[in-house]
Image: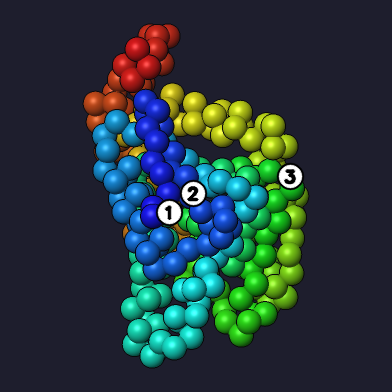
């Protein structure tokens, strides 16, 4: 039984988690499916934006119980291999060459917060709850931490990693973990608005911009970083789409990718 579906609508790909009966919790098998799905959509030239969605009342409740029962008997070596697969899934989402949007229609717990954080942007319903619950059962959110801390900031992580408090969508918005909070009726319209913005921009520039953020975020501003940014703008200016974009702006016409 598959844990997700992939739907293509022109330049948009939607990956939907389809196990609402277990709150879309993941296992090693589901992790492999998600990794494969993002690898597939990321490699398609016709895809310009990717939406990660879910069915049912919860977006993702983290690890499922059967997987947790198996993990309880793992050796350290087995745990290392298991965690590496989760880490690889998050990396593939985070580094997907296409822009990604998390469509959060319900609660997000534990490892599920890693899915949201690994996406470029997140839109949440106002009724969603969030919780990094690991310390309640003697664990830590280690594998997801690079992405979650980048998304919410270290100060918020100090609180919510340590207390395992549940927090609401408005608090998720305040700390920067999600970008928009809307009613359930407005959710698809807001996601569509972001998709429209993404596919109206230069495909190469969007891809290069995403890599720019990944390369520059959290880095010391030094000569090497400055040199890399200088090369980046020079390369994109000299590219076919860069030249076309500037010429279309100056000539007050639509660029070729919108024609």
Q: Are marks 1 and 2 in contact (CB under 8 Å)?
A: yes
Q: Would you name the residue on which mark 1 appears?
A: 3
In this view, 259 is above or below 57:
above
Q: Which residue is at a point 25% across and 31% down the rendered structure image? A: 239
Q: Is residue 194 above or below residue 163?
A: above
Q: Give the alpha-carbon distance from disc 3 to disc 2, as whole Å.
A: 22 Å
Judge depth for marks 1 and 3 and give the one in front: 1
The residue singled out by tag 3 in the image is 126
| Residue position for label 2 | 18
Determine the image quadrant of residue 80.
Answer: bottom left
Q: Which sits earlier in the primary sequence, circle 1 or circle 3?
A: 1
Query: x and y percent of residue 241 in the render?
Result: 29, 26
- Residue at image position (71%, 56%) is 129
Residues at marks 1 and 3, CA–CA distance in whole angstroms? 26 Å
- The CA distance from mark 1 to mark 2 is 5 Å
How many C-alpha atoms fall within 10 Å of the one at disc 1: few (<14), some, or many (≥20)?
A: some
């Amino acid at each position: 039984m598959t844990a997700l579906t992939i739907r293509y609508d022109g330049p948009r790909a939607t990956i939907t988690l389809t196990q609402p009966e277990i709150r879309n919790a993941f296992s090693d098998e589901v992790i492999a499916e998600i990794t494969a799905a993002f690898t597939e959509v990321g490699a398609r030239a016709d895809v310009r934006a990717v939406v990660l969605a879910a069915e049912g009342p919860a977006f993702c409740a983290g690890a499922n119980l059967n997987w947790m029962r198996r993990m309880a008997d793992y050796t350290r070596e087995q745990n290392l291999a298991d965690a590496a697969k989760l880490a690889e899934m998050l990396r593939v989402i985070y580094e997907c060459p296409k822009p990604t949007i998390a469509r959060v229609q319900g609660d997000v717990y534990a490892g599920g917060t890693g899915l949201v954080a690994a996406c470029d942007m997140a839109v949440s319903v106002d009724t969603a709850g969030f919780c990094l619950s690991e310390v309640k059962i003697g664990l830590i959110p280690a594998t997801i931490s690079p992405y979650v801390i980048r998304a919410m900031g270290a100060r918020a992580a100090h609180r919510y990693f340590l207390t395992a408090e549940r927090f609401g969508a408005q608090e998720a918005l305040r700390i920067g973990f999600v970008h928009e909070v809307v009613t359930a009726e407005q959710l698809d319209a807001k996601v569509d608005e972001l998709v429209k913005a993404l596919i109206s921009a230069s495909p190469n520039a969007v891809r290069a911009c995403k890599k720019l953020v990944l390369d520059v975020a959290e880095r010391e501003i030094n000569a090497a970083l400055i040199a890399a940014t200088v090369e980046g703008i020079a390369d994109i200016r000299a590219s076919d789409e860069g030249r076309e974009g500037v010429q279309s702006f100056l000539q007050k016409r639509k660029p070729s990718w919108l024609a």
